[in-house]
Image (spheres, rainbow, N blue to C red):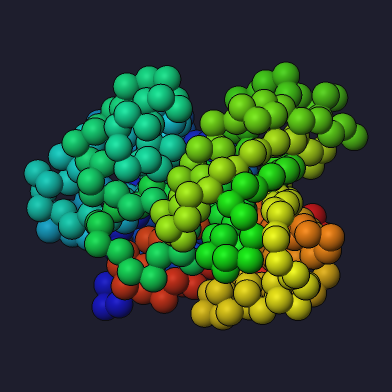
Amino acid sequence: MSENIKAVILGASGYVGGELLRLLAGHPEFELAAAVSESCRGQPIADTFGHLSPAYGDQAFAGYDDWLDALEDGSKLALFSAAPHGSSAGLIASALDAAASKNITVHVVDSSADFRYPNQLDYEVVYGSEHGAPELLDEFICAVPEHAATWDKPHVGHPGCFATATLLATVPLIASGLTDCDLFVAGVTGSTGSGRKPQPGTHHPERHSNLYAYKPLEHRHAPEMSGLTEAATGRATNVRFVPHSGPFARGIHVTVHARTEQRVGKRDLLDVFAKAYADSPFVEVVSGTPRVKDVVASNYCRIGVAAGDGSVVVMSAIDNLVKGAAGGAVQWMNRLWDMPETAGLDTVAPGWT
């Protein structure tokens, strides 16, 4: 690229916003123009994210009514939204209108759930509220980058963190035809998945040295997993999902269990996944079982498999804040701007987090 593309983050003071700031600090082409947070407006970014002080110094958060001042007419904009479900769509709509007033070319990647469903009704049934910008739905695609070789939309709704870990396991499995389409999924997530605002379930004395399921068979991400698996494979899929809260801050480990009527061995499954992700730089298929510490703080996913007695199991491990949110968003934005999708993302996991 001959010029840096300006980047703006909406909802920049949350955990996903903080990860976007960290990743953009090392990106070769995207240059932060504004970190937008009304609650932190005017405060230095380093006051909220001390670890980012070397990258951003005294740079402060912008408000929702003044971030556009940082952009010149006719410029290029990578617009990331880390705003909450239900409010992100309206903020994006306003941002797109503002950008159009200055003839700014924009691509959007939204990390909320607001653009994960192709139609308004499906979203409103799952989330129980009116969609904030239904007129924009046709301009968004929702998929993990690995499952979208081509696309015809200018903007992306990134799947959720549980959905990302699950889809990387389910799509090649269902596409292979080796199993039926009833999937049983158990996932364990770190406490950062619940956001920065303290809740009883994320309070340290409750979470430390503890493990428990929540919303079994009722979690709102299950329809997202089913729908996106079907969209990627053409096979109607039913996901029965049981999420768990884990005693760690970062990471997701998902186990997908399916039945098969034919004889399927581990080697068969490894071949399916190796072929599916042969050209996917962030997915590694391993012969053993994936571990969270092998991927935490990176944009990588590790996948392992097992087979026997008419059953198959696929295990997937990702970092919920990176591959499951901010990293996946940057990976998509790289693609939207016709850059190598690994730009700014190829740092490996630290290992001993």
Considering depth in this image, is 151 or 36 the residue closer to the camera?
Answer: 151
**Looking at the figure, which quarter contains the C terminus?**
bottom right
Q: Position of residue 24 (x, y in %)?
A: 46, 59
Left/right placement of residue 303 relative to residue 95 reads: right
Left/right placement of residue 43 relative to residue 33 reads: right
Count the labels in the image.
0
Asked whether residue 219 appears in the rendered view, the answer is yes
Left/right placement of residue 64 relative to residue 192 reads: left
Q: Quadrant of residue 316?
A: bottom right
Q: Position of residue 212 (x, y in %)?
A: 81, 30
Q: Quadrant of residue 115?
A: top left
Q: Residue at x 73, y 24 (%)?
A: 201
Q: Is residue 166 above or below residue 218?
A: below
Considering depth in this image, is 293 or 58 the residue closer to the camera?
Answer: 293
Q: Is residue 183 above or below residue 214?
A: below
Q: Position of residue 218 (x, y in %)?
A: 61, 27
Considering depth in this image, is 246 or 143 the residue closer to the camera?
Answer: 143
Residue furthest to the right in view is: 209
Q: Position of residue 160 (x, y in %)?
A: 52, 44
Q: Residue at x 57, y 65 (%)?
A: 177
Q: Residue at x 76, y 78 (%)?
A: 267
Q: Residue at x 30, y 77 (%)?
A: 1
Asked whether residue 57 appears in the rendered view, the answer is no
